[in-house]
Image: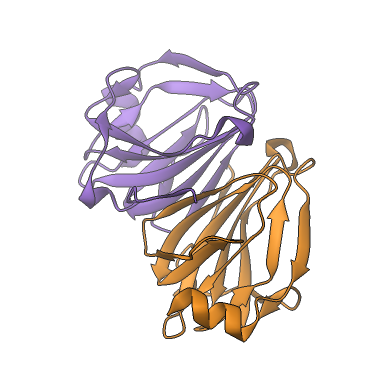
Chain colours: A purple, B orange
Amino acid sequence: MKVSKKKTEPILGLGTPITANFTGKAWLQNLSGQPEYECNVYNVTFAPGTRNYWHSHTIGQILLCTEGTGYYQEKGKPAQRLQPGDVVNIPANTVHWHGAAPDSRFTHIGITPRVSENKTEWIGEVTDEEYSEAVR
Amino acid sequence: MKVSKKKTEPILGLGTPITANFTGKAWLQNLSGQPEYECNVYNVTFAPGTRNYWHSHTIGQILLCTEGTGYYQEKGKPAQRLQPGDVVNIPANTVHWHGAAPDSRFTHIGITPRVSENKTEWIGEVTDEEYSEAVR
């Protein structure tokens, strides 16, 4: 029996503070990471205004938006506003960021497939100017 | 930009009726299935009393319970009651079923990792006697 009683509702437990590669406050809660699955599943909660750095994944990543309002932006494209129920399939080797709206907390489930091969490259901060431009 | 506006809330669209290997009414809604991810993500909604057949997966499967009350049972073990927020890591090659409680609709997100290698074997119906015994 492999049922774990971790809650996907972040209000019941936001998880562990994320300390690197984010601007602002964010929390990580692992939901599943069995080695044989080669697939990690986790909640990320962003405080209002928080976003992660520009980064890319060599395979890609799936986001399932579950709470609040957020944004996803690929380099050189307009940001897209995210609401609960939205699904983002982040393409391989594509520089992007995701995070909360200025006035809303935001939570998504993240799914990282093919974890052994799927490397993340962190590039640098989304500046206040870039963020303001993206979410206006 | 790969944002799709599929909703994870089943109330907004239950998806396609499932016609095989289930007892009762159930619906499938694909959320993500990019070939390069080797990882399928989908909602399954079970009407009250509905369950799938006894089956197993050669790699395993992840369930994220999102709505209603359900059950998960491995062959020869007691069933475990599931509520929103519960996570089930189904082990490889383990005969099991999942479904709704008799008096509640149940929805979970399913995540199938390593899809090319991850074969499902369907064994047979969970009889009314087996189901009643499991959920009493």
- Residue sitting at x 22%, y 51%: A11
Depth check: B91 or B50 in front? B91
Q: Tell me if I can see residue B24 in this picture.
A: no
Q: Is residue A31 shown left or right of residue B54?
A: left
Residue A121 screen position, x and y as percent = 52, 15
In the image, residue A20 above or below residue A91: above
Residue A58 screen position, x and y as percent = 63, 22
- Residue sitting at x 55%, y 76%: B46
User: Where on the picture, by quarter, is residue A99?
Assistant: top left
Residue B64 screen position, x and y as percent = 47, 55
Picture quarter with the C terminus of chain B? bottom left
- Residue sitting at x 57%, y 56%: B110
Depth check: A112 or B92 in front? B92
Picture quarter with the N terminus of chain B? top right
Q: Is residue B114 shown left or right of residue A66?
A: right
Residue A44 screen position, x and y as percent = 35, 38
- Residue sitting at x 46%, y 13%: A123
